[in-house]
Image (spheres, rainbow, N blue to C red):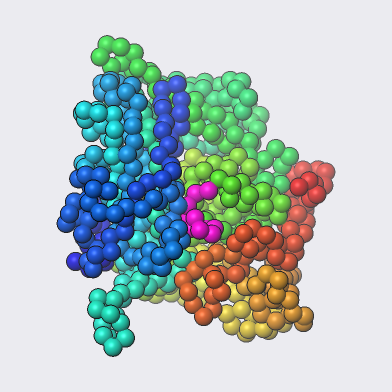
Amino acid sequence: MAPCCSLALLLLCSQALAHSKGMLYPRESASRELKELNGIWSFRADFSQQRNEGFVQQWFRQPLRQNGPVIDMPVPASFNELTQDPALRNYVGWVWYEKEVLLPRSWLLNALRTRVVLRVGSAHYYSIVWVNGVNVTEHEGGHLPFEADISKIVQASSGALCRITIALNNTLTPHTLPPGSIQFMSDSSKYPKGYFVQKTKFDFFNYAGIHRPVVLYTTPTVYIDDINVTTTLKENVGVVRYQVSVVGDINYSLLLTLREKEGDVVTTGHGPSGELKVVKPKLWWPYLMHENPGYLYYLEVKLLAEVGGEPLEDVYTLPVGIRTVYVTSSQFLINGKPFYFHGVNKHEDADIRGKGLDWPLIVKDFNLLRWLGANSFRTSHYPYAEEIMDLCDAYGIVVIDECPAVGMKYEANFGNKSLAHHLVVMEELIRRDKNRPSVVMWSVANEPASELPPAAQYFKTVITHTKAIDPTRPVTFVSNANYAKDRGAPYVDVICVNSYFSWYHDQGHLEVIQLQLKTQFEKWYDHHKKPIIQSEYGADSIPGLHYDPPLMFSEEYHTAVLKEYHSILDKKRKEYVIGELIWNFADFMTDQATTRVLGNKKGIFTRQRQPKAAAFILRDRYWKLANESSCVHSTLKYNNF
Ligand code: BDP
């Protein structure tokens, strides 16, 4: 079987695995314990011609080291850049990860009362998981978590040692998100027998591996499975509507306590659904819009049940921000006040760790965002780690939460199979991020070929589905199509447009930017009468490269492009333009190409997070914008960093 075929077979299973359960972030509590499995795992890439040796030889049946050589592989991390082997950097197919873990005896002894769950924060792209050789789950798609209840397996085994095996395939097909294809090169005068490459239409390196934390956690056997919170404001009363789902029994009681950050009780409630009222609430405000941005209350949910005649308790605490979001034909309102997105597009990308979660990098990036005066970002072009989203909630960084639908350039990407998977991905994304105050809008795709005929029905379905699951947030997708030919734009709440004037065309002609940008905005607005975000713009620059008058790739050209854009943005933001997101926060790795110099260099920071000249231009601008639009009376402190 060729790698793409073997993957395609597996995808059939995943459609059947649609879920109705919750995916609460694992948190320790009085009733829940947690064990992180980050660190060194055993690893082997299956280099067999068909990439199927692991399945033929059933590598999951015994420790991986017993059926061939293994290497050390850190989790979380991408595997691509960590060895000196170019074949692993460009590897396509199945790789195998394994970890042996000792479980606390207390987790195993009381099967009646303790549930053990294995959770993977994300793994790219298709995962099959075994525990002690038993298949426990499969999951399609990177960037989103999945989990399996492994209680029966570990509690039935004789010892406390538990072996976790994950087979992971990074093959992309026309129906995956993002899509891709395998090209077999059959000309034997040019390529060895069986030679193939993976082709994609997106502009970032297809890093693969277990990218986010893997944890084992416990819950009681009767447990809080999901919590759904929405907030509204009526005059000076904040209303927190909640819905709690419980699994394991139908007889239970639920007690809810809403607390201030410091622990003081604000109000209480009970039962699986209801409303909590907060008089004069401390609202969740975006960064720089208020002196106390990102205010979070804490909703403690306590479940009381009985198992085997003995009382049983489960406790889960959810951060809650009280805020509202509303879109008019020319404004984006947060808590009833016009909000202007002055922010960035990012990537989860840095150096040798690829897309692996990295705490120092996360903290540095948030410090840079705040230094910059950025109040928002788009999770281009896939959902970011929950750990990153937590900080957005806490700091008041507003998020446009994007799903991994990027590079959909062919008709084949708009068929029923892609659509069915796209709907599942939106369900998984909303299930994960629905309670986050920072998330103010869903983006269902980036630059799809939305002028193709099937795109109309496709986006109508995806957007309608998204709105049906979450009626509280606006929905968009990011377009680079013609304003009149875009077949998805009629269904969005906000128009998001990308353009690269004087970069991908009219190269070097800075003088045309203003006219072209003005035309772009006016055409889109006249046609759709919806607020517009400039969701990408920018230029590449090689740090340290100078040329004046500006030439492309110099830092001077980079800043000049930005300034031309800003002069039109300043006019149109007084009308219906509601935001600007620079492409990109930092340089990032791409496939090799004649237009890419060790990756995409449109970052205002280097990949090592040092500022280019463009960062200072943007910093001045963002702080000025913040001072104009903030509800804070005194001037915001630009120099506090
Ligand atoms: C846009 C894409 C983005 C690219 C950028 C670029 O949305 O992913 O990286 O262009 O070319 O079209 O730099």
Residue 68 image-quadrant placement: bottom left
Residue 382, image x, y percentages: 46, 57
Residue 201, picture quadrant: bottom left
Task: Please provide the residue range marked out in magenta.
Answer: 349-358
Q: Is residue 174 left or right of residue 628?
A: left
Task: Give the x, y percent position of residue 14.
Answer: 26, 52
| Residue 240 visible in image | yes
In the depicted structure, whether residue 121 falls above or below residue 374: above
Q: Quadrant of the N terminus?
A: bottom left
Up/down of 9 relative to 18, above or below:
below
Residue depicted at 45% across the width and 52% down the height: 77
- Is 149 in the magenta? no
Judge from the rendering whether residue 244 lies leftward or rightward of residue 336; answer left or right. left
Residue 172, horizontal then vertical, whole percent? 34, 65
Q: Is residue 294 above or below residue 140?
A: above
- x 29%, y 46%: residue: 165
Residue toward you, 324 or 110: 110
Hey, which residue is sitting farthest top in the picture? 309
Residue drawn at 58 percent across, 20 percent down: 265
Farthest residue in the right direction? 634
Residue occupying image coordinates x 54% and y 75%: 596
- Between residues 14 and 606, which one lies in front from this camera angle? 606
Q: Furthest-bottom residue in view?
A: 189
| Secondary structure mostly seen in the magenta stretch | loop
Query: Which of the two residues, 437 or 3, is positioned nearer the viewer here?
Result: 3
Q: Position of residue 30 (x, y in %)?
A: 45, 21
Q: Is residue 339 above or below residue 550?
A: above
The answer to whether 168 appears left or right of 57 in the picture is right
